[in-house]
Image (spheres, grey):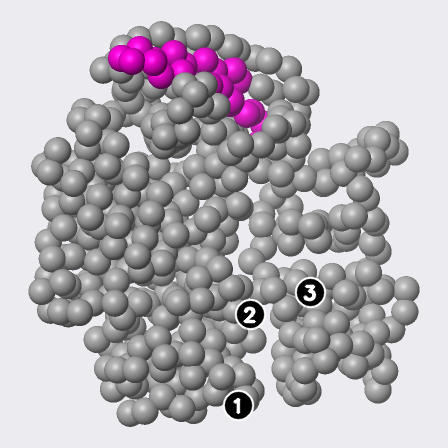
Amino acid sequence: MKFFFDDHVLDPDRRELIRGSDAIAVGPQVFDLLMYLLRNREHVVTKDDLIDTVWGGRIVSESTLTSHINAVRRVIGDTGKEQRLVRTIARKGYRFVGEVRESDVSESPDPARPHAPVAQALVLPDRPSIAVLPFFNLSGDPAQDYFVDGVVEDIIAALSRMSWLFVIARNSSFTYKGRAVDEKRVGRELGVRYVLEGSLRKAANRVRITGQLIDAGTGANIWSERFDGKIDDIFELQDQVTAHVVGAISPRIERAEMERAQRKPTESLDAYDYYLRAMANLHHGRREAVDEALRLSYKAIEFDPAFASAYGMAGWCHFWRKVNGWMSDHAPEVAEGVRLARRAVELGRDDAVALARGGHALAHLTGDLDGGVALLDRAKMLNPNLAAAWFLGGFVRAWSGDSNGAIAHFTHAMRLSPLDPEMYRMQAGMAVAHLFAGHFDEASSWAGASSRDLPSFLMVVAIIAASHALAGRADEARQAMERLRRLDPALRTSNLTDWLPIRRPQDLALFSDGLRRAGLPE
């Protein structure tokens, strides 16, 4: 059941809070607290009730509970002074006093409540919106899955470069891979008007692509077609699919937009093959996967020395190794990461992926945060639907001291790709931004969510330790510090600036103080 109140929708199953047309960033414990208040709104809930449910009975200070209640009020537009939605009952506890309606997505539309059917899902953007689902591999060879996925990824990339179109990121679309889907449900879950699905058959040197465009609101088939060609024509076939989809959605498209969307990052199928395999490894984040992504990126560059996105990915792999303390020969590895990232930016002035990965790697490895912001802003201009450009731009803004701007960027990235396998990176960014904003409970909650997906993420474990320490939770801080010391025994408060490009002295002092209190040596 979803909860509708004020102008908000809370979805317990998807763990999302929506206000109007925007997804609101909410820390896991704040979300659980709000959900418990909504479910028990008929009576006052005591502090013990909340501690037992949200914190599993662990010892929690009065200030922690109060800060979480304040965080709940903040995300739903309430205040401790007004208390129009969450009321404090003196010496008793708390109660949600706003008007609430519960609804199931399967309920029939009620003419007396015209807003109910719309509010059950993510609100549609104010422009045409589409999700491109993974195509079915009809080749009979599972080893060809990566090739099929790559074709779909390029179609998504071409559509994403059109500023008038809202395109769900590849990483969320691909969570439906291998599943029988209901297009109407996909439309509700991802908040889009259209769904593109299809299949690909590869036999010898021949390729057949079929595609169909579905109106997710009605389930009606808007367009369907089949495309045949040789394997050497695969990029041309992708362009044909893209052009037909765009034509079906909006028949009045400027030719310049189409030409820009059809630009390919490489004409080498071998380079393209290695790049796709590298990308699949990069998303996992584990050391062995990133090492493999780096090796495959170099192979892609061998086959196409002008492949900007491959340089960007290779440079970003070096950044990821640095931020997790995996470099064995620090100075030359950093220098190599900088070289690759600069080459990505030089070759990819009109390549959003190259600018996003390369620009972020440069900002981190060289400390040129202003230059990184400029490159990532250009990536967003070229492809406003590229979730990576938004969340990497969020990181650079967080290191620059713009916590509010960073939070806005991470929130938008999560809306673009709500089911993203890189969500743990977005959650880590939220944790950084909230830490520097002084929201220690939100920082620890977001960092905890990120750490559950990737326990070896060094920066996240450090944020958990620091935020718990700054919030006065000494036991939790000590436990996190033990994990941190195991992951990187050489880390010290004195070498934080060699690790992370924190610009503002007050942010560095705050982080250092938290880690020092948690037990990190000088």
Under mark 3, the amino acid is: Asp
Report x, y in % for residue 82: 74, 70
What's the residue at 26%, 50% (across, down)? Answer: 292
Question: Can you identify the residue that label 2 sits on?
Answer: 445
Pointer 2 and pointer 3: residues touching (CB < 8 Å)? no
Instruction: Name the disc covering residue 243, or none.
Output: none
Q: Along the polypeptide, which appears first: circle 2 or circle 3?
A: 3
Dot 3 crowding, Cα within 10 Å, few <14, some 14–19, many 20+ = some
Q: Amino acid at mark 2?
A: Ser
| Three-letter residue code for mark 1 | Ala
Magenta residues span 192-213
Q: Which residue is mark 1?
A: 474
Mark 3, residue position: 32
Residue in the image at 31% along x and 60% along y: 287
In this view, 204 is above or below 481: above
- Answer with mark 3 or mark 1, whichever residue precedes in sequence: 3
Residue 8 seen in the current view: no
In this rendering, the answer to whether 413 lies above or below 397 is above
| Element at label 2 | helix
Image quadrant holding the C terminus, namely bottom left
Indicate the position of residue 182 as horizontal and vertical percent values. Answer: 65, 27
Residue 260: which quarter of the image?
top left
